[in-house]
Every structure is written in C-alpha cells, then in structure tokens.
Image: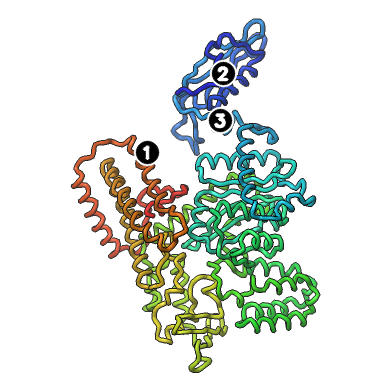
C-alpha cells in the first residue's frame, strides 16, 4: 500500500535518471527513502565481475521481501518478517563506474510505518550521541511537562542549582542509553498508557530514568495501601543502579509499580523520583511506604507524601547491624539476644524504652551515631509503635522472606542493563501469568477445610486461596495454645497465651464491646490476618466469627471491586460469593461463546449491554462512597469491550441466526456446569483456552 513520500524522493518515479558513486551510496539513498516512507531494508544480493572482481550489480529490498523458507525438521526457528513483499531497488554499474537504477518496485503488500521507522534494524543509529530530531523533541517535551509539575516544591530549584549535583549522570556502558530509551518509547507506542520520564543534568546527559507500565498503575489503584521502595540493587553496588516500587496484590504476589535507574542518593534524586512516581500514579499517595533507613529518602518522602506513614523495613535495619557493630563481635550473641528481646518482646512503649537504654548502656553505645539515629526513628520500625499500621506482609526480619526478594531471580550482581532490558518483558509476563493463574484457580476451586472450626469455614468463603491457606495454619495452630486471663472485670480483658509451638508467651487484649482485639505478636499488623493467639481468645470468649474489621478487602476475591465492602460480615460474604459466581459464569460463557461466530456475536452483545447497565446502576452508588473520585474502571472496561467488539465485527459474519435457541443453550449450559462445579470440583482445573496474561487488560478485568 502507498504512503506519502517526501519531495526529495519524488525523483524515484523517474529512477533511471539517478546516478550514484558506488553501490553503498545507492543503498544509503534507498535506506533514507525507506525511512521516510516507513519500512526496513535489506541487501538481497550483490555480484562481482569475473574479470575485474569489482561489484557490478546489487539489489536492495524491503525486509518483508520474499517468502519464509523453513525445513520441516527445523528446531527453534527464528521468527521471519517475510510475507512476499515485492518492493525493491535493483542497481547496476556502468562502464564509467557510475551506478544507475536498473529497476524500482514501489508498491508494498503491507502497512508502512513512517512514525516507527527508527525501530527497524536498518535505521537504528549506532551512535548513542546522535538521536533523531523528532524523538529528541518528544523527550524534551516530556521532560518539560514533567518538571512543570514540580512547582509545588519550593526548594527543588535550589537542589538543581547545587554545585554538588552538577555533572552527575548514569554510569552506563556505551550504547545503553539509546537501547533503554528506544525500549521505553517503543512500549509507549504499543500502549499509550505506558509512562516514562527522564531527568537530564546540565550537560543534557541522562541522570535518572523512571518508567511504569499500565498494569502497574492499575495495580496501584487497587493495592496502593502499602508500597515498598526497594533500593537494594543500588545500595549493594549491583552492576545496574536499579530501584523498584513494589506492591502486593490480593494473592500475596508482588506487583511491579515502577522501575528507575538513578545516578546517586542525593535528596534531589529522590525528590525527582518520588514526585515523578506520584504523577504516574495519578497524584495518589500510598497509606504506608516502606524504605531503607536513609535521610535523603526520608526528606523526599516527607516532602512529596506528607500524609503517608513512612516506615523502615525491619530487614533493612537488621542487616546493617553486623556492619555498624562489627567492633562488638566478642559480645555479638549477647547483644543480639538483648536486641531481639527489646524489639520483639516489648509489649508496651515504656517497656521498649527501658530495655533499649539498658542495652545501650551495657554495650556502651550512647556515643554511636547510628544507634542514636535508630532510636530517633523508632516509630518508623519498632513493632510496638505499629499498632495502627498494616504492612500487608512486606515488613519482615529477613530479605529472603520479603516480597521484594522475588525479583532477585531476575537481577544479579553482574546483570547488565542490556540483559535487564531483554528480561523486562519476561518479568512483566511472569507477574501477569502468576496473577492470572491465581485468579483462575480462585474462580474454579473450593478450598479444602482441615478442621471443624467456624473461623476456618468463615474465612474460606471470603479470602483468596493464598491468604486463606496462611490463615488456615493459624486456625490449626490454635490447638497448641493455652491461655490464662491476667485481669478480672477490666476492659479491655487481658490474656496471657502460651504458644507451645515456639515456646513463647504472648499478650492478647480483647474489648468485646468494641470487637477490638490486639496480640503482641502483631500478626494482623504485619501480615493482615489474625493470629492463633487471638483466635483462641475469641473462641474462649464465646465468639465464633472473625470481627469484620479484621477482614481486609485487599485479601478477598472482591479486592478489585470499585466499591468498598461494608463492615457487616454478611454483606462481605455475600459480595464475595456474587463475585465468584459471576467469574465462573463468565468463564463458561467464554467457552460456549467461542464455539461459533454466531454464539460469539451473541455473547459479546450481551456482555456489552450488561456492562453498560451495571455501570449505570453502580456509578450512582459509587458516588455516595467516593464523591470526589472520577469513575474509571467500569467505563474503561465497557470501552475496552466495545473497541474489541468493533474490531471483531469488521471481520465477523453479519448474519446471526437461531438467536433464541443459542441463548437458551448457553443459559442451560451455564446452569448445568455451575451446578456440576459446585458439587464436584475439588482439585485444580486446567485452562480451557489461551488467556492473554501479558496484556494490561488481563482476563480478570474483563468481568469488572
């Protein structure tokens, strides 16, 4: 198909008038022409004279020229772009040494892409310092737009003028900057919702780069309560200066909420990065942000997220102990026992204070600045100060136990930037596939109960499988606990619970009037679900249901719902049941609707109409809960389905027959299979068909 051609190449219409000094000059001219039109090029053939051994003939073609050839026993064949395109330019050498166009075929049998021409291998610029003018303008425009959003930070300009920051730039290998920016621009062209931003120093060299895909932004809208800002790969001097924003979904799986490459650990860098991430997330702040103990990060978080509770992850603090207290190696074991008791066995703030200063004085640590800084920041990391915080499983004592560590299999000490870029899509696809499988299993499987406990049965109807299995361990572990009431006729009632499994005593406070329960092990704060010690107290108090305030919506199958779950337990369970039932029916409808074009058209039409009607009903309800929040999810879901439908309808057979019969058969199949599933499904069910897990619109979103 034709495309508009620049005036400088109109002359190709009278190609026989063209002359070149060499066949390389001819190829260079054809490449320039191809780039302006929008296709990649290749050298098909060249021929030398048998007498002079000089080149006398050459042919240049579109990269889609010819047909793919492959033997039947080919192993791991490489993908081929060839689709039989005839576009080409054939040049020959005259006796005087000049080259002329012998033949020129202009027409292509595929779409031309002038805007994306720079991505073709033949048009890539090998010099990282030379960039296409249009792309440079696009980058500078993005940077200008981004920096205009920093006007609400009064002192950022001062940091930009700081002499200490001048000239700092990313330490990259030759060509890495161009490869990275091309990846980011390519992903944004594939999906306009992909977000990236670059920070240039005064010499217009890359200093910091940030990016996040559309799925990451959507995950933050659903699971933005707790975010971990992981600087491990940067501070541990990995080969790439990578930092990550990580969240956790309702299946206790890490979600990638943003990636960045940074040049240094200055306040300016973290201010730029936090503000950029804030913009990408729609200017929404997390409730809790977990980071390393770092003064520059602390200043940046306080500036950009003044309402966010900023905490230090326990393992970040504890892993620094050997390095800072190395000179106390002779007393290491004794110190660690005291520190462990101070951190994990202090049930009140006063108890922590007394134990802390006793430990400091015993080991003569009062003059040590790092120890003093830990005490000053005690409300950011010591468990006894965290009664009002939920960490969703992020804050752990060991790096290996943290959700952030799941990315360690992709990034090693010697991983280069190019290797990381090559693996980036794999990382995303792995994350999406894991979530899609967990969603699918949640819709198709019924959790197995291992005890007659009413708590286990209650939670099995609400939580996702992964969270339920962890809670189930607590239910079973309650059998190894013995409690003793510490006070009489006081509110709240206090119990001492002996856990024979770990041979520890825990304190549990229970206020029956307010349904408030608190355990000194802090399972609910750190993991998001009640512990065995609290379960024993509830059971002995004659309470056989987990209070609804201790059932977090983020751990339920309805976590992606736009509307918050009510505090009434029966409404929580009803909503999750409705959600699960609709998901199962949607899968069955997809299987039935895909059998023919007619059933597909019918199912798609019904889905579109149902989505519109449900969105209309729910939007009025949602406005009551969130009057200042724009409605995105339902409308975007309807729009995606509509766009998909319009695309499919172009190629679909417009004839739709036997509508009533098809509708009845689908409904019958739905009812029959739902009943069979509820009665017999015990184990895992394999995927019924291919699921697009790499897309930002995973199939879990198709049911809104």
Mark sitting earlier along the chain (3/1): 3
> Is 483 on the left or on the right of 166, as rendered?
left
Q: Mark 2: few, some, or many residues within 10 Å (few <14, many ≥20)?
A: few
* Measured Cα–Cα span from mark 1 to mark 2: 35 Å
Q: Cβ–Cβ below 8 Å for labels 1 and 2?
A: no
**Residue matched to label 1:** 647
Residue sitting at x 66%, y 52%: 272
Q: Position of residue 479 (x, y in %)?
A: 45, 82
Nearest the camera: 591 or 231? 231
Q: What label sits on residue 117 in the rendered view? A: 3
**Residue matched to label 2:** 7
Mark sitting earlier along the chain (1/2): 2
Residue sitting at x 73%, y 83%: 358
Q: Position of residue 542 (x, y in %)?
A: 40, 86
Q: Cβ–Cβ below 8 Å for labels 3 and 1?
A: no
> Is 276 on the left or on the right of 248, as rendered?
right
* Measured Cα–Cα span from mark 3 to mark 1: 25 Å
* Quarter assignment of residue 476: bottom left
* Quarter assignment of residue 47: top right
């Amino acid at each position: 198909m034709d495309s508009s051609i620049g005036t400088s190449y109109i002359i190709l219409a009278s190609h026989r008038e063209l002359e070149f000094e060499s066949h390389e000059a001819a190829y260079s001219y054809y490449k320039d022409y191809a780039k302006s039109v929008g296709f990649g090029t290749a050298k098909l053939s060249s021929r030398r004279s048998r007498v002079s051994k000089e080149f006398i003939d050459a042919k240049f073609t579109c990269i889609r020229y010819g047909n793919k050839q492959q033997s039947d026993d080919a192993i791991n064949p490489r993908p081929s772009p060839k689709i039989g395109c005839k576009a080409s330019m054939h040049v020959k050498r005259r006796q005087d040494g000049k080259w002329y166009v012998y033949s020129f075929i202009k027409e292509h049998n595929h779409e031309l892409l002038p805007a994306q021409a720079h991505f073709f291998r033949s048009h890539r610029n090998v010099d990282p310092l030379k960039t296409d003018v249009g792309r440079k303008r696009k980058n500078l425009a993005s940077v200008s737009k981004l920096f205009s959003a920093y006007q609400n930070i009064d002192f950022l300009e001062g940091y930009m003028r700081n002499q200490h920051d001048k000239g700092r730039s990313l330490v990259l290998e030759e060509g890495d900057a161009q490869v990275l920016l091309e990846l980011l621009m390519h992903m944004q062209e594939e999906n306009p919702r992909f977000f990236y931003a670059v920070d240039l120093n005064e010499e217009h060299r890359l200093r910091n780069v940030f990016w996040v895909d559309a799925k990451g932004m959507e995950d933050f809208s659903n699971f933005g309560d707790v975010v971990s800002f992981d600087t491990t790969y940067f501070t541990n001097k990995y080969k790439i200066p990578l930092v990550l924003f990580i969240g956790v979904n309702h299946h206790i799986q890490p979600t990638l909420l943003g990636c960045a490459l940074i040049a240094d650990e200055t306040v300016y860098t973290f201010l730029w990065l936090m503000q950029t991430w804030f913009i990408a997330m729609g200017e929404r702040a997390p409730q809790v942000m977990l980071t390393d103990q770092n003064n520059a990060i602390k200043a940046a978080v306080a500036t950009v997220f003044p309402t966010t509770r900023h905490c230090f992850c326990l393992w970040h603090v504890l892993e620094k102990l050997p390095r800072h207290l190395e000179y106390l190696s002779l007393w290491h074991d004794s110190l660690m026992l005291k520190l462990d008791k101070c951190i994990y066995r202090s049930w009140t703030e006063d108890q922590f204070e007394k134990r802390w200063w006793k430990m400091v004085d015993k080991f003569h640590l009062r003059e040590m600045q790092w120890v003093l800084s830990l005490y000053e920041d005690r409300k950011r990391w010591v468990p006894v100060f965290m009664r009002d915080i939920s960490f969703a499983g992020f804050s752990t004592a060991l790096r290996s136990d943290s959700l952030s560590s799941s990315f360690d299999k992709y990034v090693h000490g010697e991983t280069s930037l190019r290797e990381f870029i090559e693996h980036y899509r794999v990382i995303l696809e792995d994350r999406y596939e894991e979530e899609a499988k967990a969603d699918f299993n949640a819709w198709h499987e019924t959790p197995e109960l291992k005890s007659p406990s009413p708590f286990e049965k209650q939670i099995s109807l609400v939580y996702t499988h992964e969270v339920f299995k962890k809670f189930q361990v607590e239910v079973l572990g309650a059998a190894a606990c013995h409690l003793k009431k510490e006070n009489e006729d006081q509110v709240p009632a206090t119990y001492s619970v002996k856990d024979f499994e770990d041979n520890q005593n825990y304190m549990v406070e229970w206020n029956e009037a307010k349904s408030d329960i608190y355990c000194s092990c802090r399972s609910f704060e750190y993991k998001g679900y009640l512990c065995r010690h609290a379960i024993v107290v509830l059971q002995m108090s004659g309470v056989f249901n987990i209070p609804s305030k201790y059932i977090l919506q983020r751990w339920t199958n309805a976590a992606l719902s736009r509307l918050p779950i009510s505090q009434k337990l029966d409404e929580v369970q009803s909503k999750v049941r409705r959600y699960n039932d609709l998901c199962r029916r949607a899968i069955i409808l997809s299987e039935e609707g895909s059998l023919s074009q007619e059933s597909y058209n019918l199912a798609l039409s019904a889905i579109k109409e149902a989505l519109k009607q449900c969105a209309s009903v729910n939007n009025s309800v949602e406005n009551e809960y969130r009057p200042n929040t724009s409605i995105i999810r339902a409308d975007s879901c309807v729009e995606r389905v509509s766009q998909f439908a319009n695309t499919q309808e172009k190629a679909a057979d417009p004839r739709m027959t036997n509508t009533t019969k098809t509708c009845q058969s689908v409904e019958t199949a739905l009812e029959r299979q739902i009943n069979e599933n509820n009665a017999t499904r015990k184990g895992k069910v394999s995927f019924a068909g291919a699921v697009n897990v790499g897309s930002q619109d995973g199939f879990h979103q198709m049911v809104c």
